[in-house]
Amino acid sequence: MSNRHDLQLRQRAAKVVPGGMTGHLNAASLPAGYPQFFERGQGCRVWDVDGNEYIDFMCSWGPNLLGHHHPVVDEAARRQQALGDCLDGPTARFVELAERFVARSAHADWVLFQKNGTDATTVCLMVARAATGKRKVLVATKAYHGADPWCTPIPQGITPEDRAHLIHYTYNDIASLEAAVAQAGTDLAAIVCAAFKHDLGIDQELPTPEFARRARELCDQAGAALILDEVRAGFRVHAGGSWETVGVRPDLSAWSKSIANGYALAAVTGVDALREAATRIYTTGSFWSGGVAMAAGLATIEVADAQDVVGHVQAMGQRFRDGIAAQSASHGVPVRQTGPAALPLILFDEDPGYDKGAVFTVEALRRGVYLHPKHNMFLSLAHTVQDIDRALQATDAGLCRRRPTLRPPLSRSHVRVPETRTPQ
Amino acid sequence: MSNRHDLQLRQRAAKVVPGGMTGHLNAASLPAGYPQFFERGQGCRVWDVDGNEYIDFMCSWGPNLLGHHHPVVDEAARRQQALGDCLDGPTARFVELAERFVARSAHADWVLFQKNGTDATTVCLMVARAATGKRKVLVATKAYHGADPWCTPIPQGITPEDRAHLIHYTYNDIASLEAAVAQAGTDLAAIVCAAFKHDLGIDQELPTPEFARRARELCDQAGAALILDEVRAGFRVHAGGSWETVGVRPDLSAWSKSIANGYALAAVTGVDALREAATRIYTTGSFWSGGVAMAAGLATIEVADAQDVVGHVQAMGQRFRDGIAAQSASHGVPVRQTGPAALPLILFDEDPGYDKGAVFTVEALRRGVYLHPKHNMFLSLAHTVQDIDRALQATDAGLCRRRPTLRPPLSRSHVRVPETRTPQ
């Protein structure tokens, strides 16, 4: 399994990029052996710059919902690109996509578009504060809502004032939520909830219906906005919005990642009561109205709904989960699998440093399966039963504790000369 | 000049988008008669959804540096798209583009990439604060540095704490800058300067060498970072960085808009002394490492340098400026033309409500020339002498105060049935 090109690029990057790479795609946060640089993708497969092929369970950390190079999405994007992308105003795709979001999202009366998930969560806070004239925002401890100064998980280069009006609660803990609301007093602007609890490195939790309903009640009583962060979960849990599964509708939802199948797009949807406030805030970006990502978004929704992507990713995720559970039992290696099956997380018991997770995922990686040892993963419409079963062959090696030495890869098919090496 | 499709889209948008449109592309901020929705672009021309053709002096508010559908850029993007865009890690384009920025930007030792101009300016603040451990940031009064809570020009939905550590100075006013530095005391993290003064609706100003040098000195004395906001000006004033024109190098520069010719990309460049701080902050976005925009960025730089885009846009801007000046003198209508010729601004004397500007630009618009009455405009590599001279025929009507009634358009060529009406 060659990594020569990856090493060369890392050496070059070390000179011109701080730390060689930053952010969530930094391979330094993964076990040794993971590639940093990628060459291409097709369906649910990715190839690194050394031509190693992987069945991909990260899906670009979410965006790849339908598979790389989905023909309907790429054709829609290509047609829009042939007309124009970034112009002096939006294209008709802007209106068409806003209409589709409103028609599809259970709570949504209007839409604003952005580029980053962080843009969307930040816009939600601005709308809530503009609407209420209040300042306090409740967020769950350790929840990830983006990487602006108010929310970045590594608080470097920020000031205390960036978080002066945040109050923390514990996800699914009604008493802690009530205490946080009490702390906000008459100054509560919003409660922010992730669609489900998907904090790095700890077991995931679906929202309990009681917690979701209580959050809704508390917002209604205070005149505050209930903000649902759908950036991670959106389009994989429920087509109408993730909390349709618990019968609770938010006032604002933040969307990004999968909504345009990898084309850069984010959105905020909101209820009519917040429409006027949404006209008063001023946020914008040079590329937020670009037509290509919106054309891709329209096609993504068309395909997602026509082919029941939610049902598919849940079924494929469940098949993977069942297979892992069987291997875990067979090998006597306890694992915890939590959260929606479509966004699976696998953690090992007694593994505070994720060392077992590292062994497990590196063994799978060597056999052509790209997993993550402590972040939730993602299924796509492109994952087939055959892909899942093929991946389970690879995971078996990692879970086999009685055979700690490496077995040869099941196949060399993932180590091949790349088809294209010419740099751009 | 039909606007039927534009009106239909506005009616639809009014239902699903707060206020029908938001942000800098909201046509509500333009005189009546301007289209809101656009169909396509080619070179320096854009077509609205009713098929009206315009010679475009806004260039998508900056991003269109080389002309819409520049073949080199679009081919590079198409080739990368065929491989992959948003993957589990960056592509080799990431490293190649970082290397190009470092080679090209006079001060730059390293690069971080983002999507929005606001991302870039915010990252600059975070790096400066992480490096210095200090909080105060100096910004010029009325300067636009993005639309996050700390900088949005319309402070709705924000809290006072979002701006707790901003101190204001007056651009090009050394005494005010010194006073602001004194106010920061021992807590100065950064001085932020726009590449030139380009505040909405007032005369632009190039930086004086004395002001730029003093800003540099004050940062050096305080151990603070000098941040240059190149989002607006970058790639149109000087290839190596806009303050090369005054012989002053920043510690950090924020780039976006034109750097990938309309593909969504932003970047921060910095000096070695800030590299370690840049590894400590945590900012990221789902699409920040996307290969397509980086391939477009590489091609944009290649073309920009090979064809001296800076020289071209300055020459075309100067030809336009000279023509406007001649018309102004001829018709006895004083105008003020300020800032770099490549980013021209035309304001009228005694025009506090921009009513003269509105008449001028609407007359030009009716004759197929898209101008802005109070925001700086942008030239591109695609603007030819013929385009400028054709535009000057149109502006003559707007400047002719003795003939306030509308003359017939010089040509009907800009009112045509669009070639493509099929949505998507």
Image (cartoon, coloured by chain):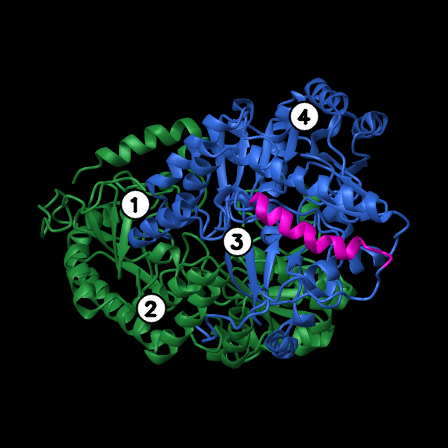
Chain colours: A blue, B green
Asked if residue B236 shows in the view, the reply is no
Foreground: disc 1 or disc 4 = 1
Circle nearer the viewer, 4 or 2 = 4
User: Label 2 near label 1: C-beta < 8 Å?
Assistant: no
CA distance for labels 3 and 1: 30 Å
Q: Nearer the viewer, mark 3 or mark 1?
A: 1
**Residue type at the position of mark 1:** Phe
Residues marked 1 and 2, same chain: yes
Residue B365 horizontal/vertical position (percent): 22, 48
The secondary element bearing badge 3 is classed as loop
Q: Check whether the beta carbons of the residues at disc 1 and disc 4 lie within 8 A of each other.
A: no
Rendered image: mark on residue B38 = 1
* Direction from residue A125 to residue B390 in the image, left or right: left
According to the image, label 4 marks what residue?
Answer: A224
User: How far apart in space, not on screen, are marks 1 and 4 (Cα)?
Assistant: 37 Å
Residue A160 x %, y %: 78, 50
* Closer mark to the observer between disc 1 and disc 2: 1
- Which of the two residues, A22 or B236, is positioned nearer the viewer here? A22
Q: CA distance from mark 4 to mark 2?
A: 49 Å
Counting residues from the start of the chain, the first of labels 3 and 1 encountered is 1
Q: CA distance from mark 2 to mark 3?
A: 22 Å
Q: Which residues are magenta?
A: A384-402
> Could you confirm whether marks 3 and 4 are on the same chain?
no
Q: Which residue is mark 2?
A: B341
Q: Are marks 3 and 1 on the same chain?
A: yes
The residue type indicated by label 2 comes to: Ala
Name the residue tied to disc 3: B142
